[in-house]
Image (tube, rainbow, N blue to C red):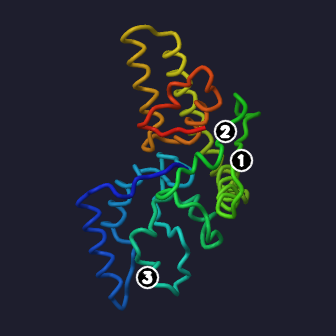
Amino acid sequence: MIKVDRNKSYDEVDTAKDVLKREKEKLRRSYNQPEVLEALKLIFNRKCYICENKKITSYNIEHLRPHKDQNMDLKFDWDNLFLVCGHCNNIKSYRYENILDCTEVDVDELIAFRKEGNFAWDEHIEIKSIVNSTEVDETVDLLKKVYNGTTAMKKMEAVNIKKELRNEIVKFMNVINEYWDAEGEDKEDAKYLILRELKPSSAFAAFKRWIIRDNREILSEFLEEDSIKIKL
């Protein structure tokens, strides 16, 4: 989970807001409209806001704060609608009411994201809170269930997410190795590739940022980049 800029200006967002406003006034109303989904894809960089997987097979529109079919303001509020995959949406559902809002806070500065182990049989996902708060604790609990699964079916889905995460981490580590070995223009090219992988639009960006943090003595220059705002 990484901070997302919700204030980006897109014509699609204005259209989505208009559609939501009209739908809210209807007798048979629904926020699940194609215009809303397309706008959310743009804002959330076509990846699930919870697990950060970009290879989504099932896009869902999710409410950060559950409405429980009682609060129509929450149900049709553009700022309460988030792009999520079916796996994460099913796990979160209405059970989590106070998770961190990734459009408001830098989640990866409050929670550590690590993939431990180099092989499929010994790897595990470590999600650890850095500060004590109800919102952080609830978010950590959700993320642990997302990456590890809760039922037999969800554990199978979590394995697929971890496979994508593993592939992304391997590619990222290769780029870091290229940067370390390179000189001159080649080093600058490798640096650009690293910075691109640390942006919010990158898949599993929170995990990649924590690789930088965990190697801060060697990769300290990336902690100081204003464009990614990584802090200790």
Q: Nearer the viewer, mark 1 or mark 2?
A: 1
Query: Looking at the picture, how far across and down is residue 59, in whole percent?
Result: 45, 59
Q: Residue at x 55, y 55 (%)?
A: 50
Graded by Cα atoms within 10 Å as few (under 14), some (14 to 19) or many (20 or more), the crowding at tag 3 reads few
Q: CA distance from mark 1 to mark 3?
A: 33 Å
Q: Residue at x 53, y 50 (%)?
A: 106
Which label number is shown at residue 73?
3
Q: Residue at x 64, y 42 (%)?
A: 113
Nearest the viewer among 199 and 45 is: 199
Residues marked 1 and 2 touching at CB (< 8 Å):
yes
Query: Looking at the picture, how far across and down is residue 19, in whole percent?
Result: 29, 75
Graded by Cα atoms within 10 Å as few (under 14), some (14 to 19) or many (20 or more), the crowding at tag 1 reads some
Which label number is shown at residue 114?
2
Which label number is shown at residue 167?
none
Query: Of marks 2 and 3, which one's residue comes earlier in the chain?
Result: 3
Graded by Cα atoms within 10 Å as few (under 14), some (14 to 19) or many (20 or more), the crowding at tag 2 reads some
Query: Of marks 1 and 3, which one's residue comes earlier in the chain?
Result: 3
Name the residue beneath numbered marker 1: 128
Name the element at disc 2.
Answer: strand
Vertical comparison of 8 with 115: above or below: below
> What is the three-letter code of the residue carrying label 1?
Lys
